[in-house]
């Protein structure tokens, strides 16, 4: 490659879009990029524990093949040569996939999940898996197989979840792109607390044929990156009709990449501090108001929006429990973590009448959002009601003086939007009053994901122009000291079983 001299740190400081552009211009070698990522993982991961099983040798072979394709002058796909982290809930062929669960600690799939296969086809190089709570349940990335993931701004604190490993890997530059998934905020929450971008797309836009309830849009897969453009690039490589997915619908990569330009002066913004139904700490309210004040002079309208979220908690209890019992109702309870067991037990208490009522409430909420988004182009709210707390606390028990009813009630700002089925993005913009990353939750029109991305990219550029509202970046020098306490929860270390060692990928980090 005819590359300009650049240090590994300089390479990893580039966005995924910039890295891909340099690969296409023969300035950056896919091999050099991968080696920079591996070196950063080996240096930083012991301090944050974001990376699970690794597949470095197969990734190196793929990077060499990617470089050869560049040198031959081949037509290059969207993600050509970009290392990828895959959340440990998604199957990866030949690479350990545990979902952080003791029952699956030796599970090595023989085939990729549909999204992983699609991203590989788009040129991404699967380098490793990223940590998640046990079976993805909860917004604190910790499990008995791999341990806990620490926040990159302070490893003693919660990184969020359930896509916490992905968010930390991105924030620290270990990887340029990562997959995430979202039921009650699992993409948006860790993105917000780690200072990266996470998009919960419209249900059916990103294929997810393995979800147990094929017609339920409560759980989706989506892209994570350091910038809106990075997320849009990855989304463009993810879309397309999949006839094995009941919700899938046709979409073209060109709909999302390159992103169209949005005119902020015409943007109509509705905002809410709490959606009218959930407690939010005073400091978070003040930080939100400061961000809105920064936006206000540049948009056509910035007005409060009222949405009747009555019975939203009940509705989410039911639809969430419904999904968990569909996936794990027949599994030995002894192999399930406490959060998953709580959902399964809750589901067994609900009646058919409860289900009907919950789905009726969800339908009403979806229509209310649709009506509000005729008046506004986007709705803005906080992602979370509090600043990060220690990862040793399983969940937030109290918010703004109110005790939470269960382990996910503190996530209502996110799951209220989940019920609406509308796409939502976590946009990092500075820090909260505790000095931790803060993000806006920006909600767009159903199946208007490209429009949402364009609007948020325009807001991102505006906010990046001032140090107080620009995306926060962790201090990597503070992450050179390993934190063995993050492994203290490990009671069932991962093991490779089911495939020969040559097919099982590299050993875990």
Image (cartoon, rainbow, N blue to C red):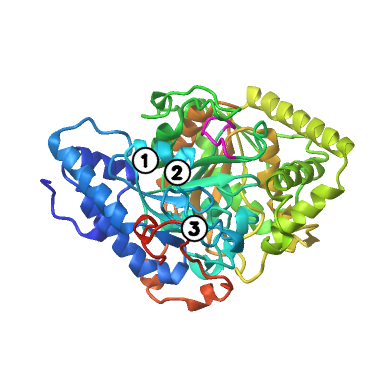
Pointer 1: what residue? 120
Q: Residues within 10 Å of mark 3 (few under 14, many from 20)?
A: many
Q: Is residue 338 left or right of residue 160?
A: right
3D distance between C-alphas at marks 1 and 2: 9 Å
Q: Are discs 1 and 2 less than 8 Å apart at CB?
A: yes
Q: Position of residue 233 (x, y in %)?
A: 38, 36
Pointer 3: what residue? 165
Vertical placement of 423 versus 194: above or below? above
Displayed quadrant of residue 69? top left
Residue 209 within the segment the image draws in magenta: yes
Disc on the earlier residue, 2 or 3: 2
3D distance between C-alphas at marks 3 and 1: 20 Å
Residue 289 within the segment the image draws in magenta: no
Vertical placement of 387 versus 118: above or below? below
Q: Position of residue 425 (x, y in %)?
A: 54, 40
Q: Position of residue 23 (x, y in %)?
A: 22, 42
Q: Is residue 132 left or right of residue 509?
A: right
Query: Which one is nearer the viewer's eye here, 486 or 160?
Result: 486
Pointer 2: what residue? 112
Task: Please report the residue visible at 13 percent of the width from the left and 48 percent of the height from the top.
Answer: 3
Q: Which residues are magenta?
A: 202-210
Of badges 1 and 2, the one in the foreground is: 2
Q: Residues within 10 Å of mark 1 (few under 14, many from 20)?
A: many
Q: Secondary structure at mark 1?
A: helix
Query: Which one is nearer the viewer's eye here, 269 or 346?
Result: 346
Q: Can residue 470 be seen here?
A: no
Q: Secondary structure at mark 2?
A: loop
């Amino acid at each position: 490659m005819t590359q300009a001299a650049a240090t590994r740190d300089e390479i990893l400081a580039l966005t995924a879009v910039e890295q891909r552009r340099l690969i296409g211009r023969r300035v950056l070698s896919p091999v050099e990029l991968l080696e920079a990522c591996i070196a950063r993982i080996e240096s930083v991961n012991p301090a944050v524990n974001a990376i699970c099983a690794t597949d470095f040798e197969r990734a190196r072979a793929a990077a060499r093949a990617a470089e050869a394709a560049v040198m031959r002058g081949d037509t290059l796909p969207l993600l050509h040569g970009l290392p990828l982290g895959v959340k440990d809930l998604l199957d990866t062929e030949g690479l350990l996939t545990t979902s952080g669960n003791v029952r699956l600690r030796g599970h090595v799939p023989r085939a990729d999940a549909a999204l992983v296969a699609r991203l590989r086809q788009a040129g991404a190089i699967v380098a490793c898996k990223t940590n998640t709570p046990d079976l993805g349940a909860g917004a604190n990335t910790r499990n008995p197989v791999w341990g806990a993931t620490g926040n990159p701004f302070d490893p003693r604190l919660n990184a969020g979840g359930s896509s916490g490993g992905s968010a930390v890997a991105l924030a620290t530059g270990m990887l340029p792109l990562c997959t995430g998934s979202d039921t009650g905020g699992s993409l948006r929450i860790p993105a917000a607390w780690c200072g990266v971008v996470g998009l919960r797309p419209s249900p059916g836009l990103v294929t997810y044929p393995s979800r147990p309830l094929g017609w339920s849009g409560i759980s989706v897969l989506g892209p994570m990156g350091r910038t809106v453009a990075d997320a849009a690039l990855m989304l463009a490589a993810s879309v397309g009709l999949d006839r094995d997915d009941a919700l899938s619908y046709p979409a073209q990569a060109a709909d999302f990449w390159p992103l169209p330009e949005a005119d902020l002066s015409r943007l109509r913004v509705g905002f809410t501090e709490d959606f009218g139904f959930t407690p939010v700490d005073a400091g978070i309210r003040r930080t939100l108001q400061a961000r809105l004040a920064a936006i206000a002079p540049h948009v056509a309208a910035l007005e409060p929006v009222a949405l009747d979220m009555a019975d939203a908690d009940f509705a989410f209890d039911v639809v969430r429990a419904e999904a968990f019992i569909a996936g794990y109702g027949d599994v030995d309870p002894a192999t399930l973590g406490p959060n998953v067991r709580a959902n399964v037990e809750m589901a067994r208490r609900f009646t058919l009448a409860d289900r009907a009522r919950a789905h009726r409430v969800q339908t009403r909420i979806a229509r209310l959002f649709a009506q509000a988004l005729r008046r506004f182009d986007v709705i803005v709210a906080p992602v979370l009601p509090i600043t990060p707390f220690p990862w040793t606390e399983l969940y937030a028990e109290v918010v703004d003086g109110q005790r939470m009813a269960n382990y996910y009630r503190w996530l209502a700002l996110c799951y209220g939007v989940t019920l609406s089925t509308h796409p939502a993005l976590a946009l990092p913009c500075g820090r909260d009053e505790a000095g931790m990353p803060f993000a806006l939750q920006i909600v767009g029109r159903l199946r208007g994901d490209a429009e949402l991305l364009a609007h948020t990219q325009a807001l991102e550029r505006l906010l990046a122009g001032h140090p107080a509202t620009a995306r926060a970046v962790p201090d990597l020098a503070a992450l050179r000291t390993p934190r063995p306490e993050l492994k203290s929860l490990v009671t069932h270390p991962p093991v490779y079983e089911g495939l020969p060692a040559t097919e099982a990928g590299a050993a875990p980090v």
